[in-house]
Image (cartoon, rainbow, N blue to C red):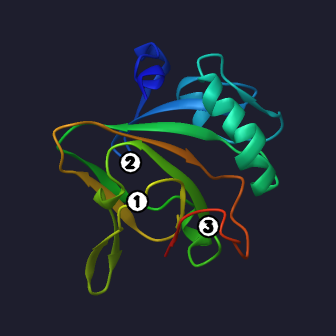
């Protein structure tokens, strides 16, 4: 956690769509800042120099082999007592398709994440470890704590696997 929050502020950028600060960790051609948020065409996924070694090793030896591909990896930092905008994590025309996103909250609570439903907001349970969520479902987050929330997020171009064999704690739909 400390290694990520101590990365030079110039490497972070504000994502207006989600209302959170983002730090690219792995991007195509190791592009930093907002340029790293696009998967664009061409180029290989590469770690940025500020990515802590423990994250690189864990993704390279555990997560990516399980996913079957490399993906963009970002750190998301939400301020204390701050809300993320409600959003989807895919193109609107892909809603209803498999749009799984890999997440691990390294500081804070998972239960501050919620999904919009016809019956109201549904907060997710507390999860200790990585989880997969459906990025095509409208969701938001209210960090109601007096401390920041730090999440490591991976997804596109990976859209998920049709089945998970006890590799992650929970699939949130």
Front residue of this view, candidates 30 and 49:
49
Left of 149 or right of it: where is 59?
right
Q: Earlier in the sequence, mark 3 or mark 2?
A: 2
Question: Who's the residue at 65% across and 69% down the image?
Answer: 166
Label 1: how many Cα within 10 Å (few below 14, some 14–19, many 20+):
some
Q: Is label 2 in a helix, a strand or a loop?
A: loop
- What whole-number distance in Å separates the C-alpha atoms at marks 3 and 1? 13 Å
Q: State left or right for residue 120 relative to residue 98.
A: left
For the residue pair 62 and 36, the one nearer the viewer reads as: 62
Q: Are marks 1 and 2 in contact (CB under 8 Å)?
A: yes
In the image, residue 143 above or below residue 100: above
Residue tagged 3: 99
Earlier in the chain: of badge 3 and badge 1, it is: 1
Residue at 58% over, 62% down: 91
Classify mark 1: helix, strand or loop. strand
Residue to which mark 2 is pinned: 18
Question: In this figure, which residue is indicated by the disc labeled 1?
Answer: 87
Percent position of residue 98, x then y: 65, 73
Q: Residue at x 60, y 71 (%)?
A: 93
Closer to the chain start, of discs 1 and 2, is 2
In percent of width and height, residue 165 lies at: 71, 72
Circle 3 — which element?
loop
In the rendered image, residue 120, in percent from the top left (x then y), is placed at 25, 80
């Amino acid at each position: 956690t400390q290694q990520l929050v101590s990365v030079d502020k110039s490497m972070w950028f504000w994502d207006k769509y989600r209302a959170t600060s983002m730090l690219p960790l792995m991007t195509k051609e190791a592009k930093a800042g907002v340029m790293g948020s696009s998967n664009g065409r061409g180029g290989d996924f590469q770690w940025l120099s500020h990515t802590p070694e423990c994250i690189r090793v864990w993704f390279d030896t555990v997560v990516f082999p399980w996913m079957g591909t490399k993906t963009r990896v970002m750190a998301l930092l939400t301020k204390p007592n701050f809300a993320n905008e409600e959003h989807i994590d895919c193109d609107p025309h892909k809603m209803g398709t498999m749009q799984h996103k890999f997440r691990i909250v390294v500081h804070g609570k998972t239960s501050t994440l919620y999904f919009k439903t016809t019956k109201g907001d549904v907060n997710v349970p507390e999860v200790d470890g990585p989880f997969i969520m459906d990025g095509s479902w409208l969701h938001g987050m209210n960090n109601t704590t007096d401390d920041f929330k730090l999440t490591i997020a991976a997804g596109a171009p990976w859209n998920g696997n049709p089945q998970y064999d006890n590799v992650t704690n929970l699939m949130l739909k």
